[in-house]
Image: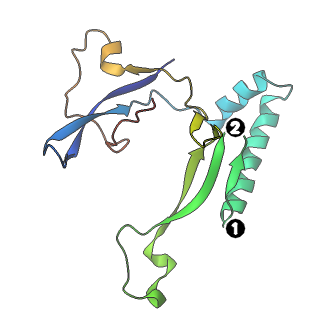
């Protein structure tokens, strides 16, 4: 199944042209929970779905413990998770005034990559080999979607030239 996308019009004007430009945005077609993942992983191993589910549950617990100890967590072939603080414009004037109350904690994920000797990226985990299909072109007879419609998923980022 390909990655589905649809056009999204940014609410911000482009600095060069002064126009509200369009960008691709991924359309989510569903959600897979840990129970479903456990069943599918079990099919590739000698473990039962229950054993896999237990391992996933314990992975979440152990990762949380390390992240809350200011450590990053790298999972080979998957990527690295790390804790970050987002202050979102809540700066203070002096060094001594800085406190955790200014920010919210969140977890950032960076997919695993492999690199050439010159440090250029060769592959990105879970992205390499993905095929993209425009959703409104896939669904026949819809006549397309409202060009300005985009929901609130994503963020109107410029398209990734490597996809």
Residues under numbered marks 2 and 1 in contact, where contact means CB atoms less than 8 Å apart: no
Query: To which residue does mark 2 refer?
Result: 77
For residue 46, which quarter of the picture?
A: top right
**Image position, residue 54 (x, y; %):** 78, 42
Identity of the residue drawn at 23% across and 24% down: 145
For the residue carrying disc 2, how many other residues have a C-alpha within 10 Å: few (<14), some (14-19), or many (20+)?
few
Q: Residue furthest right?
A: 46
Colour scheme: rainbow
Q: CA distance from mark 2 to mark 1?
A: 23 Å
For residue 90, which quarter of the picture?
A: bottom left
Q: Quadrant of the C terminus?
A: top left
- Which secondary structure, mark 2? loop
Q: Nearer the viewer, residue 159 or 98?
A: 159
| Mark nearer the viewer, 2 or 1 | 2
For the residue carrying disc 1, how many other residues have a C-alpha within 10 Å: few (<14), some (14-19), or many (20+)?
few
**Image position, residue 127 (x, y; %):** 55, 31
**Image position, residue 156 (x, y; %):** 31, 42
Q: Is residue 124 above or below residue 134?
A: below
Q: Earlier in the sequence, mark 2 or mark 1?
A: 1
- Which secondary structure, mark 1? loop
Identity of the residue drawn at 30% across and 9% down: 140
Query: To which residue does mark 1 refer?
Result: 69
Would you say 75 lies left or right of 102 here? Answer: right
């Amino acid at each position: 199944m390909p990655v589905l996308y649809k056009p999204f019009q940014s609410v911000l004007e482009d600095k060069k042209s002064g126009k509200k430009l369009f960008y691709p945005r991924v359309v989510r077609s569903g959600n897979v929970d840990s129970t479903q993942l456990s069943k599918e992983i079990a099919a590739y191993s000698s473990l039962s779905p229950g054993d896999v589910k237990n391992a996933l549950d314990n992975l979440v617990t152990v990762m949380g413990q390390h992240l809350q100890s200011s450590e990053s967590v790298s999972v080979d072939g998957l990527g690295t998770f790390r804790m970050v603080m987002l202050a979102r414009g809540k700066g203070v004037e002096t060094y001594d005034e800085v406190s955790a109350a200014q920010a919210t904690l969140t977890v950032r994920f960076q997919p695993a990559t492999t690199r050439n000797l010159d440090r250029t990226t060769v592959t990105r985990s879970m992205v390499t080999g993905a095929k993209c299909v425009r959703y409104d072109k896939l669904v026949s007879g819809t006549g397309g979607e409202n060009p300005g419609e985009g929901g609130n998923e994503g963020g109107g980022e410029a398209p990734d030239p490597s996809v």
